[in-house]
Amino acid sequence: MKSEQDELEAFCDDWLSAWTGNQPERLLSFYAEQAYYRDPVKPQGLTGQAALRGYFVKLLARNPDWIWKRQELLPTEQGFVLKWQALIPVLDAALEIEGLDIVELIDRKITRNEVYFDASLMK
């Protein structure tokens, strides 16, 4: 039988893989209908699947080949904190960045996702 840690890690790895390949509907399937999402580009945040869809469609289309990997997952009462690494193809190289997500879940759906990284690395 899988532990709670194993189940969270499996969920996290599936969710992170949905960020690669320009599949916004697949990515959205991990989020609750009224999920809240924020990142350095959207510091005011977005709420709800319609707002997330619009943002994810553009974001994933611009970055179809980036790869996100879990470095460490720390369970919390509401979900988990994730330390991650991303490889982002840029011209003939790959930019490697690290960051942190705060993820809250209800019934295996993300209700809150806050993303933190040094956005100046993306310029």
Image (cartoon, grey):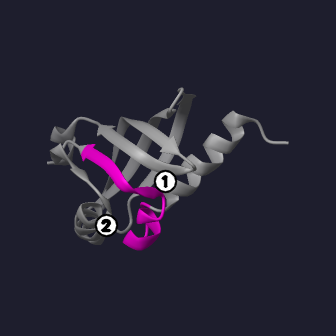
What is the x, y in percent for residue 121?
21, 41
Mark 1, secondary structure of its residue? helix
Q: Mark 2 points at which residue?
A: 60
Identify which residue is drawn at 43% across, 64% down.
Answer: 27
Q: Does the magenta stretch include residue 56?
A: no
Mark 2 and mark 1 in contact? Answer it, CB < 8 Å: no
| Mark found first going from the N terminus, 2 or 1 | 1
Identify which residue is drawn at 29% across, 58% down.
Answer: 48
Residue 27 drawn above or below residue 112:
below
Q: How far apart are marks 2 and 1 (CA)?
A: 12 Å
User: Which is more toward the observer, 85 or 6?
Assistant: 6
Q: Mark 1 points at which residue?
A: 16
Residue 90 drawn above or below residue 74:
below
Residue 23 shows in the view: no
Query: For the image shown, how many numbered marks are present on the structure?
Result: 2
- For the record, the magenta segment spans 19-38
Residue 20 drawn above or below residue 4:
below
> Quadrant of the rendered structure where residue 66 is?
bottom left
| Mark 2 residue type | Leu
Identify which residue is drawn at 55% across, 33% down.
Answer: 73
* Label 1 crowd bin: few (<14), some (14–19), many (20+), radius 10 Å: some
What is the x, y in percent for residue 31?
43, 56
Q: Residue furthest right?
A: 1
What is the x, y in percent for residue 71?
52, 36
Q: Does the magenta stretch include residue 21?
A: yes
Mark 2, secondary structure of its residue? helix
